[in-house]
Amino acid sequence: MLSWKQFTDYAAELQIKSEYVAQTKNFFDAIDPDFFDRIFNAEKIDQEEIKAAFPGEEYRRFLLIMAVAGLPSMKEHYKKMNFSQQMLDDIKPDLGLWVDKFVAETGFPGLDLRIYGWTLALRKGSILQFGRLQCNYDHAFYGKVACFRNSEGEVYLEPCEEHNDKALFSFGDPAINLHIPAAGPLKRELCIDALRKMVKFFAAYRPDFNYKAVVCYSWILDPTFTRIMKSTNLADFQNLGHLFRMEGVDETREVIWRVFDISNGTAADLDSCPLNTGMRKAVAEYIKGGGRFCEYGTVILREELEELLK
Ligand SMILES: CC(C)(COP(=O)(O)OP(=O)(O)OC[C@H]1O[C@@H](n2cnc3c(N)ncnc32)[C@H](O)[C@@H]1OP(=O)(O)O)[C@@H](O)C(=O)NCCC(=O)NCCS
């Protein structure tokens, strides 16, 4: 098991707030090092065993310590893959952003199990970051749409159930899949810059990855947002590509979690929340009025990138 000194050094490098690190000390000191090593080095995380060892919510502190302890293996992976120092520097703050969100939600520093899984993906290089945006190292599109061009050359999308050989791009095709860390405003120029870096990266490191589009699946792509509130950044992001609805994926709870830091929240929970941003005001009003959010996806065809990135 790592020492307290190593833990604090890694946490500082990952930009986790020092007060959260300090609040972890007593819990850290009480961990059985053999137990830690066994769980940390196991092929697959045994959540039942962790939950049994740290009852209630305490196991989530353990997850945070494991996530921090993963820093050296992430660095090793980056070295082995010859990924740049800039890429490592770009992705390092991600864990701290998740800890901030966790504290806003629960009041103590820890990590959700789902986010621990996410940190494993960062560690293994399955998720990479280029400036403002992240993407998968590899991805097959799972939106149920196929893209075509009409006689005027305009791109249009049609629903599909499986891969369509005649389409320019459809379900199952390789794609660069975007993720948006909670790292401040989503400025258009930062997104364009990130896309440029991704295109360069895949050309240099993954010439075998014959991606046909850049895609994203997210709550922030629901066009409802640009209808109910004043937003430049979300509107700009939605306008980068061709939007489509992920049929059947209700994102109302996800939106409540993302916007109000309440997991599994409902309309009733919003009464006690400060409506201190434009989005909070608009979303609270909309949900209390019976509105629902849906997951949307977006597609930017590879052949459209040149124009977008010039
Ligand atoms: C996506 C994100 C960066 C957009 O933020 P942004 O660029 O500030 O968005 P906008 O410019 O459209 O914001 C308009 C208003 O909504 C607010 N807002 C934006 N995202 C918000 C959020 N998640 N929670 C609360 N308020 C938010 C802004 O503060 C701004 O408020 P104001 O009008 O009072 O100044 C932001 O929502 C975020 O960090 N989300 C978390 C990460 C995430 O969910 N990623 C997608 C994963 S699928």
Image (cartoon, grey):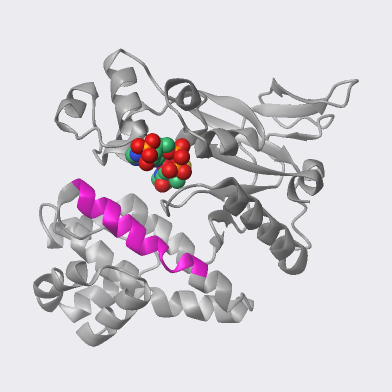
Q: Is residue 247 visible?
A: yes
Say whether residue 266 is magenta: no
Residue at image position (82%, 43%) is 303
Q: Nearer the viewer, residue 14 or 170?
A: 14
Q: Where residue 182 sits in the image (x, y, percent)? A: 41, 51
Give the tally of numbered discs: 0
Q: Nearer the viewer, residue 95 or 52?
A: 95
Asked if residue 171 is positioned above or below residue 177 in the image, the reply reads: above
User: Is 167 positioned to the left or the right of 23 in the image?
Assistant: right
Q: Nearer the viewer, residue 259 or 147?
A: 259
Instruction: Tell me the chief SS of the magenta region.
Output: helix
Q: Is residue 218 visible?
A: no
Q: Where residue 86 sits in the image (x, y, percent)? A: 57, 73
- Furthest toward the top, the residue is 289
Residue at image position (61%, 75%) is 83
Residue at image position (47%, 22%) is 224
Q: Nearer the viewer, residue 185 or 108?
A: 185
Asked if residue 165 is positioned above or below residue 53 in the image, the reply reads: above
Quadrant of ligand 1 in image: top left
Say whether residue 97 is magenta: yes
Q: Where residue 72 sits in the image (x, y, percent)? A: 42, 80
Asked if residue 89 is positioned above or below residue 230 in the image, the reply reads: below
Asked if residue 172 is positioned above or below residue 187 in the image, the reply reads: above
User: Is 246 positioned to the left or the right of 96 in the image?
Assistant: right
Q: Please tell me in which quadrant of the rendered image residue 92 appears.
A: bottom left
Magenta residues span 90-105
Q: Quadrant of the N terminus?
A: bottom left
Residue at image position (11%, 70%) is 27
